[in-house]
Image (tube, helix red, strand yellow):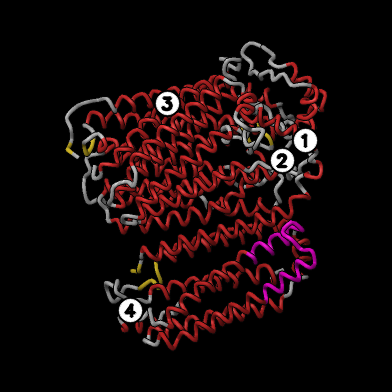
Amino acid sequence: MQYKSQAVAKPYFVAAIGLFVGQIVFGLIMGLQYVVGDFLFPALPFNVARMVHTNLLIVWLLFGFMGAAYYMVPEESETELYSPKLALAMFWVFLVAGALTIVGYLFVPYATLAQMTGNDILATMGREFLEQPLLTKIGIVVVALVFLFNISMTMLKGRKTAISMVLLLGLWGLAIFFLFSFYNPHNLVKDKYYWWWVVHLWVEGVWELILGALLAFVLIKVTGVDREVIEKWLYVIITLTLVTGIIGTGHHYYWIGAPEYWQWWGSVFSALEPIPFFAMTIFAFNMVNRRRREHPNKAATLWALGTGVMAFLGAGVWGFLHTLAPVNYYTHGSQITAAHGHMAFYGAYVMVVLTLISYAMPILRGRAANSPKAQVLEMWSFWLMTIAMVFITLFLTAAGILQVWLQRISDTPLGFMATQDQVSLFYWMREAAGVMFMIGLVVYIVSFFVKGDKVAEA
Amino acid sequence: MRPPPALPRLRAMGHDTTLTADSTPRLSGDLAVWFFILAELLAFGVFFAAYAFARMRHRELFDAGQALLDRNTGALNTILLLSGSALVVRAVQGNQRGEGRRSARWMLGAMACGLLFVGLKASEYAAAFAAGISLSSSLFHMFYLSLTFFHFMHVILGLVVLAVLWQGLRQDRYRQDANPLESGAAYWHMVDLVWLILFPLVYVIH
Amino acid sequence: MSGTFTKSMARNIFYGGTAFFFLLFLALTFDTNQALPKRDNSANLTPQVIAGKKIWETRNCIGCHTLLGEGAYFAPELGNVYVRRGPDFIKAWIQAQPTGTPGRRQMPQFHLTDEELDNIVAFLKYTSEINTANWPPNIEG
């Protein structure tokens, strides 16, 4: 560890992994509810489980991003963090606010929670992924602003690298576009239109800047390739990302009441969205092939390469599958959407956060890399989780194709629930793959506690 | 975009620092701008393909819409953009001869062409809007407005680039390193090239 | 073929390209806002519909259902449920939950008043009249 204050990243990473476990537990519960409908009902209705599953994902990724920034920015700026104390304080604020919100979801009826937390003053709740009570939303903004202040001040007093600039731009964008979560017009079409300014402009916009910055940082460290080379490719890739991704928002505007030209604009630009992901894959492999050193942390390199491949498959290929308007007309809101969502989030964001944790955590614990034994275990968890996610995606895609066929294309369309019964075999298989994912996650956590010979001192 | 005969002279001027072997052809402009140009051409290309696809299925609608477009202004615009590109080439060549400051006027000429294009296009849009044409009025108008407006914005961005280059030339900043100049010029030529496809496709061919 | 590839050029193109495409997106958004009133059924946005939307939100309906194809994929699409089932069926259905059939997916009982039921039905009617470019492909959603 080059700078003492980088240590504040550690609790962020630990919290991220802890919440990740929670996310998967609720995912497994939901997966079971898909086939055993009354499982845990009425104690835990599906909508509550789903809210916890998706909100935990967002929160733990945010913990991951913030931890990553606290780790990376001092090193990039070549200076201590502006205020480690503030960073730690915000950690506890965010963790407690997040935990209270989850407890609220689980133990208070949602309508009561809304009433208790000021939803009548400004109604923002009850929209997918933005279910958080008003107070939590305000808390997120406050934490984000304090965090950005801390990071920006650190950068201002130190070296300004392309990686930290791109990271900071992504993080500022994240905070700014989140503000649209406070805009909830009565007009449903406008509500949906601007809802995507949070959701799409996050995951297919500013988050990709964060993704690019994290990946570039780890690649510089593990390959020893010249910073100049990596940074200019980073710029090229994120340019392609935003050139395609911003107008690509249009692929969400086909069937929600927006003008029909979005079918053309959205199709044209989102058809190009796989390109930046493909470029990122090529980039990652190229840099590793041109490596100038053999970094002892093989696991981190594996995660970095995995991010490239899985982000391309999940976001690029599975996104493209149903992004063209004539196809999306049939697949919109089906299990195909769910398949894409799972693999894209895992491949792009889960994996990049795990890449950074894999690289930084051993250093935060006082060594350049974990023991070979621990690394082998971590690589096992990589394969278990990644292959499990491939299967989850394939089964959901199969379920989705069948669903679309039975419910929307066939001459004698079945109703929604009748269709669900027909595809239940695939839901069972998905649940089995989910269990495999959980095993991978357990192995991942175990790998942190495996001792063995230290590889090198940090 | 530059014709091959220009290359030997350029090499003789010794402006290219990255040249390894004399026989290696050199890419004019920064690789980064070429990535961007390729991405833009791809976006336009897919949009053109979508136009062709839609036109195939709505022949009459497209022919009727096209008949109402002002082809003369379109032709004039084509001439303006071609002249603009030629002037940019003059400016780049002038800079290669070491006459950066003097060739700024060529760049100014190119900008005048671009500005005239913008003016003519703006009046075309004003007439269209006055006639109640919008992105939602018909599939043909959707494509007509989308493609031309997407290109129109490129012309404006191109003008911003040319203005920066003009400033640079006036201060003779590209004497040692012509890379920014060549990159900006390549971008402008791309904007020109797209129009050369767009104009016949939307205004003429039926 | 050799060439120059500089970080400053890549950076400038990134900033310029991003600003360009964001402005284009804003222009399209402006046009969308102009064109929306013809499609979004906002003329029928009565206080009852607005109250219904709030019930829709505060019961987290989106946590199981889709609305115009967005939401969870656990329960039926409701953007066109007004057309598919009609107002009386919708009210009766909500009141009859949960069915309690073993092994079947269950919808919670929300204890809505008659007025609230009318509000949610009004909201679903309004939603079903939004011009969605003929989506969903058929009545089953």
Q: Quadrant of residue B148?
A: bottom right
Residues behind callouts 4 and 3 on a single chain = no
Q: Label 3 amino acid? A: Val
Q: Main secondary structure of the magenta part?
A: helix
Mark 3–mark 2 Cα distance, whole angstroms, equals 37 Å
Quick one: SS at disc 4?
Answer: loop
Counting from the top left corner in percent of width and height, residue A177 is at 54, 47
* Residue B116 located left or right of residue A30: right
Query: Which residue: 34% across, 56% down?
Result: A161
Quick one: SS at disc 1?
Answer: helix
Q: Is residue B17 above or below residue A225?
A: below
**Residue annotated with mark 1:** C49
**Residue annotated with mark 2:** A186
Along the viewing direction, whichever of B5 and A381 lies nearer the viewer: A381
Q: Nearer the viewer, mark 3 or mark 2?
A: 2
Q: Are marks 2 and 4 in contact (CB under 8 Å)?
A: no
Along the viewing direction, whichever of A175 and B183 lies nearer the viewer: A175
**Quarter of the rendering occupied by the N terminus of chain A:** top left
Quick one: SS at disc 3?
Answer: helix
Residue range corresponding to the magenta coloring: B120-149
Q: Label 4 amino acid? A: Gln
| Chain of the residue where label 3 is placed in the rendered structure | A
Counting from the top left corner in percent of width and height, residue B177 is at 35, 76
| Chain of the residue where label 1 is placed in the rendered structure | C
Mark 4–mark 1 Cα distance, whole angstroms, equals 68 Å
Q: Disc number at residue A21?
A: 3
* Residue A430 located left or right of residue C64: left
Q: Are marks 3 and 1 in contact (CB under 8 Å)?
A: no
